[in-house]
Image (cartoon, rainbow, N blue to C red):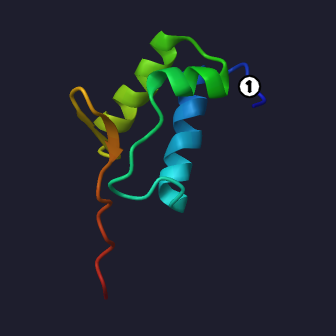
Amino acid sequence: MRWEPEVPRWRQVYAVLSERIAEGVYPPGSRLPSGLAICDEFGISPVTAKRVLTELRAAGLAEMQVGIGTFVTELPQPPSA
């Protein structure tokens, strides 16, 4: 991944993972990569990976199940007109 120096790395990784969720790479109910897997894929620290997962949960894109992992939430459907 090519890093943008003026943007925090956690925001850049967050953008990649949230885009993957939106595109269905990680569909609702699927497990997201662990913090360690995120560290390995993006070459970031465990603290940064934890921040990414925390922000995904804060945005309502993921939920953590203690001892199991972090999973993609059901995305709200746009209202039909």
Residue, disc 1: 3
Q: In which quadrant of the rendered image does the N terminus lie?
A: top right
* Residue 13 in sight from this viewpoint: yes
Q: What residue appears at the point 57 percent right and 20 percent down from the top-left corner?
A: 39
Location of residue 75 (image quadrant)? bottom left
* Residue 7 in sight from this viewpoint: no
- 76 to 61, vertically: above or below: below
Given the image, on which type of amino acid does mark 1 rest? Answer: Trp
Q: Position of residue 14 (x, y in %)?
A: 52, 35
Q: Position of residue 47 (x, y in %)?
A: 46, 11
Q: Position of residue 67 (x, y in %)?
A: 24, 26
Secondary structure of the residue carrying tag 1 is loop
Q: In which quadrant of the rendered image does the C terminus lie?
A: bottom left
- 17 to 1, vertically: above or below: below
- 69 to 5, vertically: above or below: below
Q: What residue appears at the point 38 percent right and 37 percent down from the top-left corner?
A: 56
Location of residue 41 (image quadrant)? top right
